[in-house]
Image (cartoon, rainbow, N blue to C red):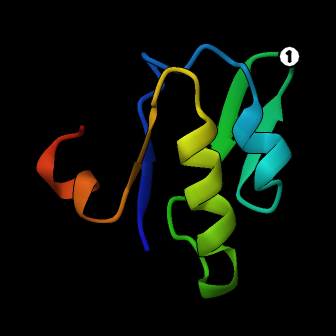
């Protein structure tokens, strides 16, 4: 699965970091880094992270190619 984070929308709440730390990382206090290619074993956690994002900045799978929510 591919993901994209809209970094202009991301506000650094870091819910994704807590829910899927193997995919999302904070660099400093607010800069989000992530791996756009999610491994099979991390898909469920990334879906939870996307659902928990207060600003809905994480785009998953087909949403990546369609331009968003």
Question: Nearest the camera: 19 or 37?
Answer: 19
Q: Position of residue 19 (x, y in %)?
A: 79, 50
* Residue at the image point whose x is 45% and y is 30% from the top: 56
* Residue at the image point whose x is 67% and y is 40% from the top: 33
Q: In this image, 49 relative to 64: left or right?
A: right
Q: In this image, 67 relative to 36: left or right?
A: left
Q: Position of residue 2 (x, y in %)?
A: 41, 66
Q: In this image, 52 relative to 63: left or right?
A: right
Q: Which residue is mark 1?
A: 29
Number of numbered tags placed on the structure image: 1
* Residue at the image point whose x is 85% and y is 43% from the top: 18
Residue 35 location, quadrant: bottom right
Helix, strand or loop status at disc 1: loop
The correct choice, above or below, for 34 with respect to 45 in the image is above
Q: Quadrant of the C terminus?
A: top left
Question: Nearest the camera: 33 or 41?
Answer: 41
Can residue 35 be seen by looking at this rendering? no
Question: Nearest the camera: 31 or 67?
Answer: 67
The correct choice, above or below, for 7 with respect to 35 in the image is above
The correct choice, above or below, for 27 with respect to 16 in the image is above
* Residue at the image point whose x is 74% and y is 34% from the top: 15
Q: Quadrant of the N terminus?
A: bottom left
**Label 1 neighbourhood size at 10 Å, few (<14), some (14-19), many (20+)?**
few
Q: In this image, 58 relative to 24: left or right?
A: left
Q: Position of residue 55 (x, y in %)?
A: 49, 21
Q: Residue furthest left?
A: 66
Can residue 41 be seen by looking at this rendering? yes
Q: Position of residue 36 (x, y in %)?
A: 51, 59
């Amino acid at each position: 699965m591919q993901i994209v984070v809209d970094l202009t929308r991301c506000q650094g709440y870091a819910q994704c970091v807590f829910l899927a730390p193997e995919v999302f990382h904070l660099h400093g206090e607010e800069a989000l880094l992530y791996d756009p290619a999610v491994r099979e074993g991390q898909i469920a956690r990334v879906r939870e992270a996307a659902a928990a994002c207060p600003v809905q900045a994480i785009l998953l799978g087909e949403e990546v190619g369609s331009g968003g929510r």
